[in-house]
Structure formats: structure tokens, C-alpha cells
């Protein structure tokens, strides 16, 4: 990452931290978490606190005491894990310290970590501590502001000390803050860090407090190169809220789509059920039409053409008295899917030419035409004819419903406001007619 970009992001993080402190968000967060902490199960609360605890190496003279975190009566506490003498051979001291750290790491939950992070504790008598009251405006750059006054606060020069300061109280009415200041000479801290590094430890902080409370100390007297704090955007505490917001946003987008999907699936299922019902209705209708067609087939064939009795009666009545038939034949002619009926008549008539209009006017046949030329009868006035005609199909009879629909119920007649008087009966003419019938 470019330096200017890292600097700008660091400045932005510092500005946000200052705004949070000035607006009271930090205090609210501490109060809120303190109120919620008793509600969290003790196992989860202790596991979370255990992740923040580190082994402590307390240096006091020629002895280094190793403390490790442990569970005692359901609560986290620090206990002495061992001691290492510092006045022997350097290699022997380093080996003893490494063994002691290995023992602590093996007893830690999850086994030995890849890097053994430790905190150092120095005797309180070797550190200079003071309680200061400073303006609240310097809180954002507190350590830098205190560094300008090291010559006034201590009898040593700034390059001879490691120092730190932490806010312990605030007075909004006076716009001041209470500061806990601590400083220690550099050789003391450098010697402790050298021992811990030789033992394979990674120093995270140096505290002037009691070793049992070193993990909770807000003062860190480590050199600047060891005080490097990872950028906020490189810590899980920074990404956890962002991840939670992303999950909520994703749920806000996905949940409506999922509900729409469920609604679409239910509509499709209902439409499929309706379609199946419609298919059943269509099948029943087709079966009903087929059954009705089978039932009406014979009747339709029967009523499609005039019956033979009617043909004989109509022909008999239509032909003149001087005409008789020697042959009357009804033929069925194929015509695609339909069939026509042809009427063939042969016989003798006094005037064969006038038979065509006579048969056309009878309404029984159409397209009357001679099938062969007429022949004159010798001797006599008659003619032999051979005519052909097409029978006219009859119109189909009207369909009768199988079930009569119920008759509509007549609406009751509205009563008139005033009933009219009954009309007088009309006089009958029966007596007069009777009188006329009595006359002779």
C-alpha cells in the first residue's frame, strides 16, 4: 500500500476515533457492553476474554516469574507457572526460559500457537508514575502532547525513557481529562525484551502494573517499533460490523425475491391444478359430444333424407294422369365424406318435356334432367322418358335438451296504490241469437 494512502487512512481512523470519544459513543459502548456482559453465558464470556489474555513475564532483579491465565472458580485468573533465574550462563538462561514458555504454550487451549505472544511486567519501583490533568483537546494526540513535556515531568531526557499515558477520567464541565502517566528508563525495558525474545517470545506490551493485572493495563512502555498496532481495517473487529450490515442488506434483497419466488411457485401450482381441471372438463365434454354423436347418428341418418313413403306419395301426386312409371329407383352416390341420393324414373307420358318443371316444383328433388333422349311411341301419342334427379336433404331437427331448465320464478306484481273498481260485465248476445234461431 502506498505510504500516502496508509497515512490518509490512519488519519481518517484517528479522526473517527476522536469523534466517537467526543460524541460519547465510546462511553456509551462501554456502558452498553458492561450491561450486556452479565447476560452472556459464562462459558462464551470467558472464552472471549481468554482470547485477549497473554502469558506474563514479570522481571524483578535476577529472577523472571512466568504467569499464565487459567480458570479458577468459573472465572479467569493469573497464576504463577514457573520462575527463571537470570544470573547464570546466557545460553542456560535462554534454554530455561524457552522450556518455561513451551510448558505454558502446551497447556494453553488449542495447543502451542505458531507465535508465542507475551506481555512483560516490570517492577513498579523502577517506573515513574504521575496523575496529570490536561485539556480535553489533547486527547486525540495524548502521547505526543505528553512527550513535549517529558523534560518538565521527569528528570530525564526524552531519549532516555520509554513512556505512555492513558485517560482515566473526564470532566466535561471543565473540558479536562485525568491522565495516568508512566515512564521508565530504557535499559530496564531493553534488558527484559532481550530476555523474552531470546526465549522465543513475541513481546506485545510492557506494563508497570502488577503481573496479575498486566493484561488489563492500559499503559504500554514498549518501544515504538513494538507498539505498532495493525490498521483497523486489518482487524476482524473492523470487518465484523461491515459483514453484519452486508448480511442484513443481502437478506433485505434476497428475502423479497425468495417471497416472490414462493408466490410464483404457488401461482404456477394453482394454475397447473386449474389446467388439469380444465383438461378433465374438456375430456368430459369431448366424451359427451362423442356419446351424443353416437346416439344421434342413427336419427341423423334417418332424418337426413325423405322417407320412401314420402317419395312415392310426392311423385304420385306430382305426375300428370297420363304418366305412369315402369321403373322408380333411389341410388346412393358417394361424394367425398357425404353421400347424395339420386332418383331415377323411367316410364311413359303424353308429354315428357313438361315433367321436368313439374318435378322441380314438387320440392322433393332438384337438378332434374333427362338421362337419355325421349322416344316416341309408335303408334300413339305417348313418349318414353328416362329422367334423373337429386333428392333434397331434409333440414336437421332441432336438438332437444336432455334436462329441461327450471322455469324462472315470476316476480310478484307490485300492488297499485288504489285498487280500481271492478269493470261491469259485457252484455252477451246469446239471448238475441236464441231469439233469431226461434223464428221460423
Image (spheres, helix red, strand yellow):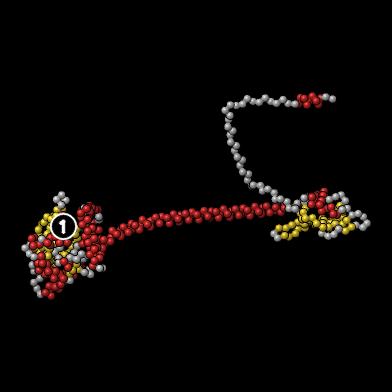
The residue nearer to you, when weighing 325 against 383, is 383
Number of dots carrying numbers: 1
Res 290 quadrant in image:
bottom right
Q: Residues within 10 Å of mark 1 (few under 14, many from 20)?
A: some
Task: Read off the residue under disc 1.
Answer: 138
User: Farthest residue toward the left?
Assistant: 155
**Where is 416 relative to 237, above or below?**
above
Horizontal side of residue 405 vs 308, given as left or right? left
Q: Please tell me which residue is depicted at 58% across the width and 26% down the height of the picture.
A: 418
The residue nearer to you, when weighing 185 against 121, is 185
Q: Please tell me which residue is depicted at 6% across the width and 63% down the height of the picture.
A: 155
The N terminus lies in quadrant: bottom left
Which secondary structure, mark 1?
Answer: helix
Q: Residue 93 in the image: x percent, y percent?
A: 12, 72
Q: Please tell me which residue is depicted at 80% across the width and 25% down the height of the picture.
A: 436
Q: Residue 345 in the image: x percent, y percent?
A: 82, 56
The C terminus lies in quadrant: top right
Residue 47 visible: no
**Where is 433 relative to 111, above or below?**
above
Q: Please tell me which residue is depicted at 36% across the width and 56% down the height of the picture.
A: 252
Residue 282 visible: yes
Q: Residue 309 in the image: x percent, y percent?
A: 79, 50
Q: Residue 372 in the image: x percent, y percent?
A: 83, 60
The residue nearer to you, when weighing 212 against 275, is 275
Horizontal side of residue 104 vs 372, given as left or right? left
User: Farthest residue toward the front?
Assistant: 4
Amino acid at each position: 500500500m502506498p505510504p500516502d494512502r496508509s497515512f490518509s487512512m490512519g488519519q481518517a481512523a484517528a479522526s473517527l476515533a476522536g469523534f466517537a470519544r467526543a460524541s460519547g459513543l465510546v462511553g456509551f459502548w462501554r456502558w452498553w457492553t458492561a450491561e450486556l456482559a452479565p447476560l452472556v453465558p459464562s462459558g462464551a464470556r470467558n472464552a472471549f476474554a481468554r482470547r485477549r489474555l497473554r502469558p506474563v513475564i514479570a522481571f524483578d532483579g535476577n529472577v523472571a516469574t512466568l504467569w499464565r491465565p487459567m480458570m479458577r472458580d468459573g472465572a479467569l485468573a493469573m497464576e504463577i507457572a514457573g520462575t527463571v533465574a537470570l544470573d547464570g550462563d546466557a545460553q542456560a538462561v535462554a534454554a530455561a526460559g524457552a522450556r518455561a514458555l513451551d510448558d505454558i504454550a502446551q497447556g494453553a487451549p488449542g495447543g502451542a500457537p505458531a507465535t508465542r505472544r507475551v506481555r512483560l511486567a516490570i517492577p513498579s519501583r523502577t517506573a515513574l508514575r504521575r496523575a496529570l490533568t490536561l485539556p480535553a483537546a489533547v486527547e486525540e494526540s495524548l502521547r505526543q502532547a505528553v512527550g513535549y513535556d517529558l523534560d518538565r515531568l521527569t528528570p530525564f531526557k526524552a531519549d532516555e525513557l520509554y513512556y505512555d499515558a492513558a485517560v482515566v477520567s473526564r470532566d466535561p464541565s471543565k473540558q479536562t481529562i485525568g491522565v495516568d502517566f508512566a515512564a521508565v528508563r530504557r535499559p530496564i525495558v531493553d534488558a527484559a525484551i532481550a530476555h523474552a525474545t531470546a526465549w522465543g517470545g513475541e513481546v506485545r506490551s510492557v506494563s508497570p502494573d502488577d503481573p496479575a493485572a498486566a493484561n488489563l493495563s492500559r499503559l504500554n512502555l514498549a518501544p515504538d517499533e513494538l507498539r505498532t498496532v495493525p490498521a483497523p481495517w486489518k482487524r476482524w473487529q473492523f470487518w465484523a460490523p461491515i459483514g453484519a450490515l452486508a448480511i442484513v442488506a443481502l437478506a433485505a434483497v434476497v428475502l423479497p425475491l425468495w417471497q416472490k419466488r414462493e408466490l410464483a411457485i404457488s401461482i404456477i401450482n394453482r394454475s397447473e391444478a386449474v389446467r388439469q381441471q380444465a383438461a378433465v372438463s374438456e375430456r368430459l365434454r369431448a366424451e359427451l359430444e362423442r356419446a351424443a354423436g353416437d346416439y344421434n347418428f342413427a336419427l341423423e341418418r334417418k332424418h337426413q333424407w325423405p322417407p320412401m313413403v314420402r317419395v312415392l306419395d310426392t311423385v304420385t301426386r306430382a305426375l300428370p294422369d297420363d304418366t305412369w312409371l315402369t321403373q322408380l329407383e333411389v341410388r346412393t352416390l358417394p361424394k367425398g365424406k357425404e353421400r347424395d341420393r339420386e332418383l331415377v324414373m323411367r316410364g311413359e307420358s303424353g308429354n315428357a318435356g313438361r315433367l321436368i318443371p313439374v318435378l322441380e316444383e314438387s320440392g322433393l328433388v332438384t337438378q332434374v334432367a333427362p338421362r337419355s333422349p325421349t322416344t316416341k311411341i309408335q303408334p300413339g301419342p305417348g313418349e318414353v322418358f328416362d329422367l334423373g334427379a337429386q333428392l333434397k336433404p331434409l333440414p336437421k331437427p332441432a336438438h332437444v335438451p336432455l334436462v329441461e331448465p327450471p322455469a324462472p320464478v315470476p316476480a310478484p306484481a307490485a300492488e297499485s296504490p288504489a285498487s280500481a273498481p271492478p269493470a261491469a260485465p259485457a252484455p252477451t248476445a246469446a239471448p238475441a241469437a236464441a231469439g233469431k234461431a226461434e223464428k221460423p
